Structure formats: structure tokens, C-alpha cells
Amino acid sequence: MLHVHTIAPFMNLRRAARAAGFDLTPVSGFRDFDRQLAIWNAKFRGVRPLYDGAGAPIDSLGLSPAQRVEAILLWSALPGGSRHHWGTDVDVFDAAAVAPGYRLQLSVGEFSSGGPFAPLAGWLEVHAARFGFFRPFRGVLSGVQPEPWHFSFAPVAEPARRALNLEVWREALVGSALEGKDEVLPRLDEFHARYVAAIDWP
């Protein structure tokens, strides 16, 4: 699902990609608070894997709670702080570049030179902005690691980003079953500045 004002621009982007020989396929669009909470908690408990900045797996249970929080934030947002909550952001890949049954990783390597989605990444770098989309996580200003698969529809996402204030976010987290809450809440100002406010502008 996507925000109502994001659907038509995304479909236009998809049609243009198809004309260029790509099957631009969404993997993840809207993700609600509870889904993000489940992802976060599974990573905090060690049920889902954690990765370092280079994408290599790390032993989450060997980390302190504070270190676990930092490791999760490299690749996953705190509930309430995910751009996917707004319905403006979508993760994509080129379904035409891989065989049926391909196990999608959404890894940097898949979108880098030699990876199956490198041609799509190059095409999107040139053409996505014409349709209002940009990559908010390129690893320049954002605290999140580079995500070449993640595109955001700027005309709707930017007002949503500005509307996400600390008070609203803190209230949502205080009332949630967030794992690591004692580590997160005292640093929420820092996390807002690093992972919500700091994005890589188009």
C-alpha cells in the first residue's frame, strides 16, 4: 500500500522503467507501527539477524542492550520513526533481472556494480527525480546505511517528516511494548536528529 497521493507518481515511474526494460517491483510500501515494532523486537531479542555497517552478520546476543539498539538502527527504524509509516516510501527491485524464486536480500551488493539490480539503480539515479522520488538514505548525511532500493516521494514525505515531532514520537513509544525502551527513550532526541531529521536530500 502507498499514500493516495503517491500511487499515481509511483505507477508513472514504474511505466517509465518498464519502457526502459525494467520490471520495477515494490517489495515494501506502507508499514504500520505494530509491524515495525515486531521487526524491532525480533531484532532486539536476536530472533532476526543484525548486520554491521558493511552488511556482515553480527552476534546480537553478544552485544549490550545499548549496542543492540545502535546495531538495529543501522538498517531498521524505531517504530514511529520509519518513513514507511507515511505510505510515501517504497523499497523496489527489478523482477526482470532475476529468475523466479530468486531470494531477494535487499543488499547493497545487489544494487552495486556486478549485482543484478545495478542497471536499475543507475536508471533510477537519473530518472526517479522526474517523478518526485529520491533516495533518502545514501550514507552521506543520514545515520541509516545506504539503501539504494529505498525511494521516497518527496512532495508528501517531507511534510510528514516535519510533522513527526519528538513529543508525538515519545508518547507512542512510552505506551508501546518496545524492547530496549530504557535505552531508547533517554536518547530519543539524538535518534530523531540522526535518523529522522538527517536524510540525504535530493
Image (spheres, rainbow, N blue to C red):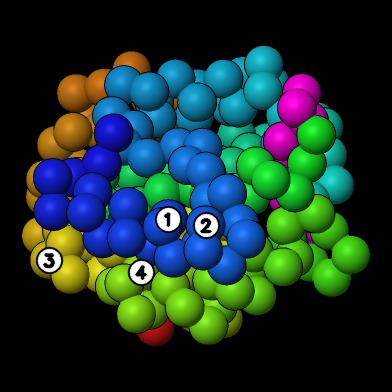
Name the spot of residue 34 as percent of width and height, x first. 31, 21
166 or 114, which is in the foreground? 114
Which residue is the extreme one toward the front? 19
Which residue is the extreme one toward the right? 114
Instruction: Say whether residue 105 is magenta.
Output: yes
Q: Quadrant of residue 160?
A: bottom left
The answer to the question of whether label 1 and label 2 lie on touching residues, with beta carbons closer than 8 A, is yes
179 or 141, which is in the foreground? 141
Find residue 14 and name its label. 1
Q: Which residues are magenta?
A: 100-110
Find residue 133 and name its label. 4
As shown in the figure, which amino acid type bears the numbered disc 1?
Arg
Q: Residues within 10 Å of mark 3 (few under 14, many from 20)?
A: few
The answer to the question of whether label 2 and label 3 lie on touching residues, with beta carbons closer than 8 A, is no
Q: Secondary structure at mark 2?
A: helix
- Which of pointers 3 and 4 indicates the residue nearer the eye? 4
Q: Secondary structure at mark 1?
A: helix
Name the spot of residue 116 as percent of width and height, x first. 80, 54
Residue visible at 28% across and 34% down in the picture: 1
The answer to whether residue 106 is left or right of residue 191 is right
As shown in the figure, which amino acid type bears the numbered disc 2?
Arg
- Which of pointers 1 and 4 indicates the residue nearer the eye? 1
Name the spot of residue 113 as percent of width and height, x first. 84, 70
Label the magenta part by its dominant secondary structure.
loop
13 or 152, which is in the foreground? 13
Q: Which residue is mark 2?
A: 18
Between the residue at mark 3 and the residue at mark 4, the CA separation in whole angstroms equals 14 Å
Residue visible at 64% across and 67% down in the picture: 121
Find residue 159 and name its label. 3
Q: Quadrant of residue 106?
A: top right
As shown in the figure, which amino acid type bears the numbered disc 4?
Phe
Between the residue at mark 1 and the residue at mark 3, the CA separation in whole angstroms equals 24 Å
